[in-house]
Image (tube, rainbow, N blue to C red):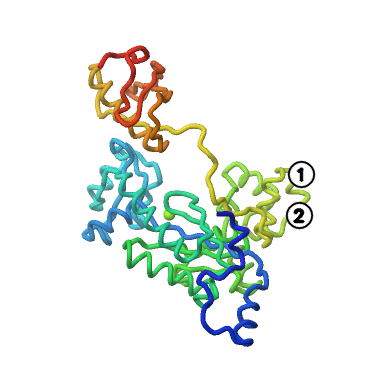
Amino acid sequence: MGRGGRRGAPLFGVTGDLSKQSIMATSSHKQPRPPLFGLVDVNNFYVSCERAFNPRLANVPVVVLSNNDGCAVARSHEVKALGVKMGAPWFQMKELARQHGIVALSSNYTLYGDMSNRVVSILREFSPDTEVYSIDESFLRVETVDHLYGGATAMGQAMRRRIRQWTSLPVCAGFGESKTLAKLANHLAKKNLVFDGVCDLTALTDAQRQQWMAKIEVGEVWGVGRKIAARLQTMGIQSVLDLATADLKLIRRQFGVVLERTVSELQGTSCLELDDLADPKKQIMASRSFGSMVEDLAELGEAVHGTSAAQQKSCGIRARWPVPCTCSSRRTDSGKQTRNTTPVWWCRWPMCRMTRAHSPWRH
Ligand SMILES: [Mg+2]
């Protein structure tokens, strides 16, 4: 369903009393309001999912490791406080883990995907205009529904309570006139206890908003990467406030239309709409690593079968006709990576059987 038809319509049908007074009250809600975006983000998502099923991990330093336990892909705030960076290799932090009792867990992406779906389904009950931005973040349009909760801040707190109660996951919510401001508000809510997990920038005065913006580095802005941040800093644009008050024409000339749009968004002009439907994917990759060197062709074939099946499932393919798949293997020896082979074959859902004609090995 497109957004246009829903905008301005009440979430719940107005029934019963059709007196003149109630009709007038209802029609006043149909005055178009400027867009108000929310961003809801689960804190330390993978770690929080693990804690939801193992309460003994609460208040314990926890890291979740990537496939085959290579490096940290999620850290509890206790681990962040110890200075462990995202992506830090596990073998480098073993000593630190021993000293501070860090619990390391293998990742469980099936669980995380399921928990993510639960959170999104709760958010859709609050606002049907929801864009799933990543596994732990969703944007919402709330200007037509926030009055049902008494404002965006109260709505954010209601979301936090319900998600916590139904999934045990902690979330923070940020609200602003644009997606970029909602992202910024979420950052503020996460980093500053004074907001109690929910920051609505539209509820702040201009002076308060500028104070907060002046405290945040420009590199924290959504869409400003490390290289652009470094260039901006050489131009004297250090904080979010500096960027928000920068000359639009200068930004466009130096960085292009994308950053100009970001600056407009920071100034409160919404330039980015919600994406209801994700673009069709041109490529889907499923990858697995072996814990040790594999020499046996049958063992390799079995692993490729499993990986292909996972890939087909990701594609949502239920077709009976053959589907082209590409397999590439990569061998890692003492830090050196070499891409060896790229055989191509055909396989079928659901058994993902490669045909003899194309398969590089026999079944
Ligand atoms: Mg998160």
Q: Nearer the viewer, residue 31 or 81?
A: 31
SS at badge 2: loop
Which quadrant does the N terminus fall into?
A: bottom right
In the figure, 274 relative to 94: above or below?
Answer: below
Quadrant hosting residue 340? top left
Q: Which mark is residue 253?
A: 1
| Label 1 vs 2, first from the N-terminus | 2
Residue at horizontal 34 percent and vertical 34 percent from the top: 310
Q: Is mark 2 within 8 Å of ligand 1?
A: no
Reading the image, the residue beneath label 2 is 247
Judged from this view, the residue extending furthest toward the top is 357
Q: Nearer the viewer, residue 316 or 267?
A: 316
98 left or right of 46?
left
Mark 1 touches mark 2? (CB < 8 Å): no
Amino acid type assigned to the residue bearing label 1 in the image: Arg
Residue at horizontal 39 percent and vertical 16 percent from the top: 341
Q: Which mark is residue 67?
A: none
Count of numbered labels shown in the rendering: 2
x, y percent for residue 117: 38, 53
Q: Is residue 171 visible?
A: yes
Question: Neighbour class for label 2 at 10 Å: few (<14), some, many (≥20)?
Answer: few
167 left or right of 235?
left
x, y percent for residue 126: 47, 66
Q: Nearer the viewer, residue 204 or 110?
A: 110
x, y percent for residue 305: 30, 26
